[in-house]
Image: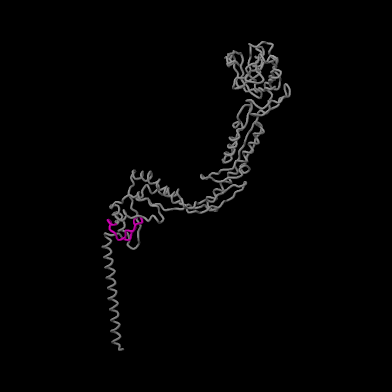
Amino acid sequence: MSRKEKFSRKKHKGSLLKRSLLVLVLLVFGGFIGSHIYFQNHFKFTKINNVDVSGLTVAQATKKLNNTHIDENGNYLVVRNSRIKINQSDVKQLFKDRSSMGLITSKKLNAKSDVSTKQYAYRIKTLLPQFKNRIDQINTDRTPTSDSKVLLKNQKLVVKKGKQGNELDKAAMVKSFKKQAKDNLMISVKMKKEVSATPTSTTIVNQKKQLRQALKNTVTLRTYNKTYHFIAKNWLTDGQPTATGKYKFNSVKIKNWVAKFAAKVDTAGKSLTITAPKRVRIAAGGTYGWKINQTTLSNAILKNLQKQDSATLKLSNYAVGTGYGTKGVGKTYVAVDLKNLEEYVYKDGKLKVKVPIMSGTLTGGNATPKGSYYIMYRQRHATLRGKNSDGSKYASPVGYWEPITMSGVGLHDSPWQPALVYGNPSARGQYHSHGCLNNPPSKMPSVWKYTHTNERVVIYY
């Protein structure tokens, strides 16, 4: 090929390249001008409320937004009746905002409208209960999720591994519903599954910390003559967390201790022995005596062992009856010998008064009760009222009255009795009382002097 031909071919190729570049530039410029004109009234690559409105006019976008439904079979529970229409003016403003942005990247925008008080109330009062029911229905056929738990077994911390199920997390979804109800155009809640707390999760670490701290708690119990100390780690043998996060402990060990302790110190309903005026076994029965309210005390110890601050309990606050702290008959009491019709008044272990008396019958409706009682109150110048064996009423004025039963048995003077009946068992058949302990009028002031309210009165035969 000649030099002239080579030059001509090279010149032709350069001209072709220039023309191609010119065409490409014209196409790009034309496309740019065209897209610029097109996007003056159409959305650029845009999603509003997760709905693609790219290439749509404001009117078209508004219509699509107000008619589009999120696929309920996907990952959301859509509350259809919660929809609030979007105003075209709001979409137009979003269009203006988008127009000022670049073309290349897609943009996600949100259209909002004020939720009126009436609309919010409808969502909460009407739609929320329906939403909860939908979750319950979905969960019917699903497997529950159980969290890992820190248990106390035989006084040792044990982690029980949880199980991951596929139930929806109702609490989390309801929370999301309530949040969206305030300002979302449509309530659409993402379906969340309950997540099981793993053995190494923060929840479990906190449970261990809480439980270890609880096992350090102490309770002190003060009785009438001794003090007892309880340390949680020695008394809380088994326990597990409740729905509220607090622990529920087994109280059997505490209950057993309280029962054993009560059996040792309770006096109510128990027989006892006196040694003066002679050694006599007093039968069980009567109103005098005290006992521990075992349920109340056990619960109090358990409850306070779960508190971080140390607690001190007084046994007297958990005792019922009369004579708290007294074991046996004590040194101040009244002893009544029904066999010999004798009454003995002791104060601080010393005999102060010995009185011959008349009692009620030994059996039947007018019998004087046997056992341990106490003077309920004291009254001067009382009138004792009741019915005789034949049904007739009586009203007997007395100068001193010390009742020992709710039915009306007590110690009092009896001016109507002949002097010879006092201390005379053979006269009991004819001159017996209605159950009271009749004292000679001349002796009753001394009995009154050395007795007091709540003093024990033991009656035996």
> In this rendering, is residue 417 above or below 264?
above
Quadrant in the picture for residue 421: top right
In the image, 337 versus 150, the foreground residue is: 337
Residue 400 horizontal side relative to residue 38, left or right: right
Colouring scheme, one of rainbow, by chain, secondary structure, one colour: one colour
In the image, 124 versus 104, the foreground residue is: 124
Quadrant in the picture for residue 265: top right
What residue is rendered at 40% in x and 45% in y? 129
Report the magenta residues as a range.
Answer: 44-60
Considering every residue shown, the one lying at the far bottom of the view is 2
Q: How many marks?
A: 0
Queried whether the magenta region covers residue 46, the answer comes back as: yes
What residue is rendered at 30% in x and 82% in y? 10
> In this rendering, is residue 283 above or below 182?
above
In the image, 73 versus 228, the foreground residue is: 73
The x, y position of residue 194, in whole percent, is 48, 52
Queried whether the magenta region covers residue 139, the answer comes back as: no
Figure quadrant of the C terminus: top right
The x, y position of residue 336, in whole percent, is 68, 20
Quadrant in the picture for residue 283: top right
Figure quadrant of the N terminus: bottom left
In the image, 24 versus 167, the foreground residue is: 167
